[in-house]
Amino acid sequence: MKLIILLITAVSLNLQSINLEAVRDAYKLAAQDKTKTEAFNASLATVTKKDKIELVAYKGAAMALVAKHAKTLKDKKEDFIEGVTLVEYAISKAPNNIEVRFIRLGIQENTPKLLKYKGNIEEDKLFILKQFSNIKYSALKKHIKDYILQSKAFTDEEKSNL
């Protein structure tokens, strides 16, 4: 019984130690190469739907990125679907959360047309632009602004209005 309590405590501490700022930084780097993608995915392995909704969305993004490097077409498809299902779950639970909308936008903007996962780009873009000035956390605001400035989904005028 003591062993079970110890294991539960260890898992709980691990979940509590996931730093959202570190996850954001890892997300930026994850698309650069397979090793960073795998590390990002591994860092979120213990996240479940019961965790902070932003972490659930980042886990979905990690799984979608892992799909990019999968060996078989079947694995690519399964990993991608599992990942975007988590992102969509996060959106359904927190539709007014700018960070989860930002995550979905990033995935949809960078997903090949073949996967047909581009249906919310304009909706998420408009939501982000409307809510951007209301972001309370400067680190999150900078994170989203950095993405917008390099994004092709936003016009030069929209970028300059930030």
Image: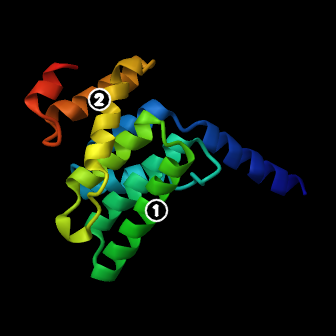
Q: Secondary structure at mark 2?
A: helix
Quadrant into which the C terminus falls: top left
In the displayed structure, 98 sits above or below 89; it is above
Disc 1 residue crowd, few under 14, some 14–19, many 20+, Cα 10 Å: some
**Display colour scheme:** rainbow
Q: Mark 1, mark 2: which one is toward the viewer?
A: 2
In the depicted view, which residue is nearer to us: 156 or 52? 156
Q: Residue at x 32, y 54 (%)?
A: 37
User: Residue lying farthest right?
Assistant: 1
Q: Amino acid under label 2?
A: Leu
In the depicted view, which residue is nearer to us: 104 or 32? 104
Residue 85's disc is 1
Residue 160's disc is none
User: Residue lying farthest left?
Assistant: 156
Q: Is residue 146 left or right of residue 102?
A: left
Q: Quadrant of residue 34?
A: bottom left
Q: Which residue is mark 2?
A: 129
Q: Secondary structure at mark 1?
A: helix
Residue 80 in view in this figure: yes
Residue 22 position, x and y percent, is 43, 34
Q: Residue at x 22, y 51 (%)?
A: 109
Q: Residue at x 40, y 68 (%)?
A: 81
| Labels 1 & 2 near each other (Cβ < 8 A) | no
Q: Is residue 152 left or right of residue 99?
A: left
In the displayed structure, 7 sits above or below 157; it is below
